Amino acid sequence: MADGYLENRYDEVFGAKGKKVVVKRISIDSLLERNRSYRGYRKEYEVTEETLKKIVAVNTKIPSAKNQQALRFKLITKNNGAGKVLENIKLGGMLPELHLPFAGTEPEAFIIVCGTVPENKMLDIDLGISLQSMLLKAVDLGLNGLIIGAFNKENVTHEFQLPYEPLAILAIGSGAETIRLVPTSADENKAYYRNEAGVHFVPKIRAEELLIE
């Protein structure tokens, strides 16, 4: 046990002067519920490079196949190339008629995730773990995000002089949309959709239908 653990734990729970302090607990379920794919963001909130660094830092704590740690990250803000990223990505593939993102709600901060080795099954597993972990960190910071797989790899590589192949792009910002999860069956249509009020609905298969009997 680390030196001073009990003393530090006592201070955390009861306060340095012995007064009981309520420690808020954020559950993983809460983070997962809030971790939705936002395609529109508030312009009044600027995501800084320091914030992006905090998000990328989770990669020092997550699993990696064979511990190869072959992912690298390029940080992009509105001050160093966000516009170039926007020119080379596509959002809302299932809602092409909406031409997302709407004008004035474009994301302005991105994390370009690259691989230092040729793409393979293990690297793709690492990529998934990394992207989800970074999104959960963003939610923990009060932000939102979106995994972007539809982008022009050649242009992005050239525009930012990337030394490695880009595998995915993560958009980060303060979400400007209302998103709701709706339960559905495994054999029903699972495409996301929006109503006339602009609420974004995401069907999710019920837990009991995920189990193999």
Image (spheres, rainbow, N blue to C red):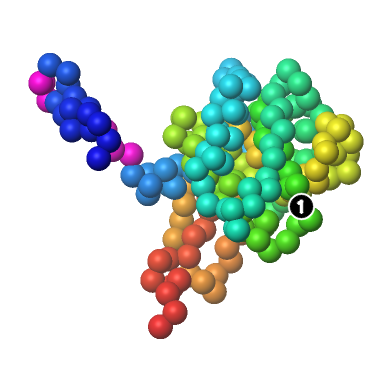
Magenta residues (range):
18-26
Q: Residue 113's quadrant in the figure?
A: top right
Q: How many marks?
A: 1
The quarter of the picture where the C terminus appears is bottom left
Location of mark 1 (residue): 117
x then y, percent, for residue 211: 42, 74
The quarter of the picture where the N terminus appears is top left
Name the kind of residue labelled 1 in the image. Val
Q: Residue at x 56, y 41 (%)?
A: 59
x then y, percent, for residue 147: 64, 45
Q: Residue furthest bottom?
A: 213
Q: Residue at x 80, y 46 (%)?
A: 165
Side (left or right) of 154 relative to 112:
right
Most common SS among magenta residues: loop
Residues 153 and 15: in front is 15
Residues 173 and 28: in front is 28
Q: Residue at x 22, y 29 (%)?
A: 4
Q: Secondary structure at mark 1?
A: loop
x then y, percent, for residue 79: 73, 18
Q: Is residue 151 visible?
A: no
Q: Is residue 133 above or below residue 140?
A: below
x then y, percent, for residue 27: 33, 44
Q: Residue at x 10, y 21 (%)?
A: 18
